Image (spheres, rainbow, N blue to C red):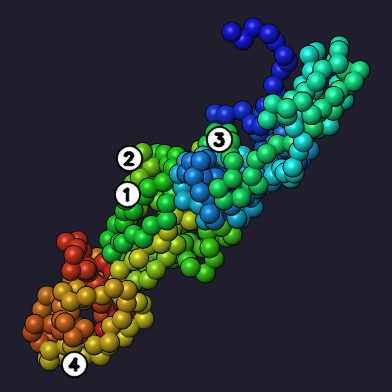
Amino acid sequence: DFRTPVGTLVLQGPIGGQTFRCDVGRPCRISGLDGIGLRRGDSFRPLAQCGMSGKGAPVAYAGDEKGTDFDWGMSAAHLEPKAYRLCWCRPWVTEKSPPVFLLPNATPTTNTTTTTATSTREMEDGNGSNTSNVSAGMVTLEVVPEVPQCEEGGAFVDAGVLLIVGPRYGLFLCDAGQPCAVTPLEGEELANGDRLLIASLAKPCGTGEAEPVVGVPDGGLSDQATVEGTLYEWKSSAVVAQGGTYLLCWCSAALSNCTQASDYMISAGKLQLVGPYFGHTRICLGGLTCVLSGITGQALRAGDEIRIKPSCRSSEPSLGFAGAARMGEDGVFKWPAPITATGGNYRMCWRSVSSSGDHGGGGGGVVI
């Protein structure tokens, strides 16, 4: 039934199906948005769905005349790694507009336009009464969009996906004196070949000046990730750093060779290295049972053991000590029998109750 062409409707806005990426925890900027009639001041919000409430969602406004460049800065740094709908809105200033009338052969344009028709026609108002006479085929058209402001609950157009790339923040555990593995690391677009850096708390990952931890093999750098970027291991040797909490900084193999600490700009969470702090010195008397009290560290617990060895990297214990001292519920390490070792300085080497490996965690020394 609709056979008479009356013109063309130009719908301004972005073309759907576009994909943009930003790194988690980093400044976010996208450019090159494709669309029709885009302009400075248009806005974007990353939302679960463009029809849903966007309370607290960071907003960016187009900063170029073509409306293609959007910069959130650090306001989107808190977004969890996942895919968000990229929701566009133009912040119109809405006003009351008079009725819009269109005469035959009129050619309206946006905003206020004067058009010419071929004859005079009476126009009816909404109630069907003749209230307007237009002479000489002249009519003024005013087109004002009746859409809400770009606020929560506003009208948003789905332009595609904003993918926040990187690992999700996590807390992982390893035992001092044992090989360390971080898994499963979850996130978006993780891949085999990515790597982690165990770094000091002194300088956050995003500074580009992350400080590797002394006692972690290979300068703190993990082996290349496996299992689709979810498993990170330090397999060359045991982690012999003191117990404590350390940063995990992530590097994407797709963007870097991941060989320098400055490549690790994105935080993957924290590593709790369970074990004693360094620097303990205790004195015991030969021929008596030795008791070690006041040994402090990260998450020590009943059943942990200390064995005396020439070096904590050695598998052979020193002679004269009856096996290992075990930590009781009172936090004290105690040997089951008197010491028969000769006088001297000895290394105390710790092992977690949950580990079956060597006593490889350093904690200080014992003077007999």
Mark number, residue 227:
2
Mark 3 vs mark 4, CA separation in Å: 76 Å
- Percent x, y of residue 306: 20, 75
Q: Are marks 3 and 1 in contact (CB under 8 Å)?
A: no
Q: Quadrant of the C terminus?
A: bottom left
Element assignment for label 3: strand
Pointer 3 residue: 158
Of the numbered discs 2 and 4, the one sitting upstream in the chain is 2
Q: Nearer the viewer, mark 2 or mark 3?
A: 3
Q: CA distance from mark 2 to mark 4?
A: 52 Å
Label 4 sits on a secondary structure element that is: loop
Q: Is residue 174 left or right of residue 86?
A: left
Per the image, label 2 sits on a secondary structure element best described as: loop
Whole-angstrom CA distance, mark 2 to mark 3, is: 34 Å
Indicate left or right for 126 with 53 as reference. right
Q: Amino acid at mark 1?
A: Pro
- For disc 4, the marked residue is 285
* Residue at 31% in and 53% down: 181
Q: CB of mark 2 within 8 Å of CB of mark 1? A: yes
Three-letter code for the amino acid on which mark 3 is drawn: Asp
Callout in the foreground (3, 4):
3
